[in-house]
Amino acid sequence: MVQQAALTIIGVAGTLLCFLGGSSLGPMGAMLNVLTPLPISYLCMRFGLRTGVTATSLTVLALSFMLPLPTLLTYAALFGCSALLLPTMLLRRFSWERAVALTVCCVVALALVLVGSYVVVSGQAPATLIDHYLQNEIDTAMQVYQGADLDQQQLQQMEEVARQVADFIRDTFVGLYIAGVLAVQLLTLLLLQRLRKDHYQIEGVPFPALRLPAVLIWVLILVGFSLLIPQESIQLVARNGLAVLLPLYFLQGLAVVADFLQKRAYPAALKGMIYVMVFLFNPLPLIVTGVGVFDLWVDFRRPRQKK
């Protein structure tokens, strides 16, 4: 009981650090932000849903003294919700892939309800909200660059790049948001798996054996060809569809890489370096995504007969 209480306090403190630190540290704090659901998710897996609800309530209470209501609702509906939903389904013996998919759907649905409610109350269009958000991010980034002793020409170049990125995000905001929610749940799941020891079990296929539903490839093909239609609304939907589907096929390609490394007696450090390169070094992410797409036909994980 003492250990449970101590870990609950640590979990609440860790959640506050990740959520508030990610907001105050700028780009360097982004990694902290995506770890926000982890402490409470671990408490749920270790001690049960009641402990997770208690930790979430304490976190919301603490945040209520520091943040305005909209930001507080953002935490409760997005991070707080996923921190409870994912472990609850895992404890009910849902496979990890099903638990992640359902959690993403629930979080996105809650986000739609929040945004819809805000639009009704404020009278602002969703596009206006996105523009304001992106402009605030550009202003914040430019303040950072101005403090980096860059000359005027370099500042203009950085501002141009920032606006190009903002235009891309504006056109694919919904798809990128869904992909971001998926990434947060997968990272939480990965760390829960690393922390589990003998405290709990996570059901589902081993990651190296992960395969997306075969029918999804036809959705990808349809969305890809939709970009050729000279209709802005159709292209907008297609771009957002690709923003969701391509990360999924990157995930399947990553499973192929994991299967390859699992069958090789490489040192753990070398395997770690390979994973880092796959994520960070162009054009490796694109190649891995292509492997995930063509895995349906080529089946890269099929045992090969040696001649």
Image (cartoon, grey):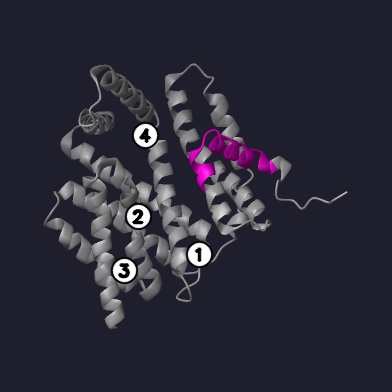
Q: Picture quarter containing residue 178?
A: top left
Q: Which residue is mark 4?
A: 173
Of callouts 1 and 2, which one flags the residue occurring earlier in the amino acid sequence? 2
Q: Which residue is mark 2?
A: 35
Of callouts 1 and 3, which one flags the residue occurring earlier in the amino acid sequence? 3
Q: Is residue 156 left or right of residue 259?
A: left
Q: What residue is at 34 percent from the left and 23 percent from the top?
A: 161
Q: CA distance from mark 4 to mark 1?
A: 30 Å
295 within the magenta span: yes
Q: What residue is at 23 percent from the left and 18 percent from the top?
A: 152
Q: Are marks 3 and 4 in contact (CB under 8 Å)?
A: no
Can you tell which mark lies on residue 280? Answer: none
What amino acid type should be assigned to the residue bearing mark 2?
Leu
Nearer to the camera, 244 or 197? 197
Q: Which residue is mark 3?
A: 52
Residue 60's place in the image compared with 136, above or below, is: below
What amino acid type should be assigned to the residue bearing mark 4?
Phe
Q: Mark 4 or 1, which is nearer the eye?
A: 4
Q: Which residue is mark 1?
A: 94
Where in the figure is residue 78, as x and y percent of width and height? 31, 52
Q: Residues within 10 Å of mark 1 (few under 14, many from 20)?
A: some
Q: Are marks 1 and 2 in contact (CB under 8 Å)?
A: no
Residue 237's place in the image compared with 52, above or below, is: above
Q: State which region is magenta.
A: 276-296
What amino acid type should be assigned to the residue bearing mark 1?
Phe
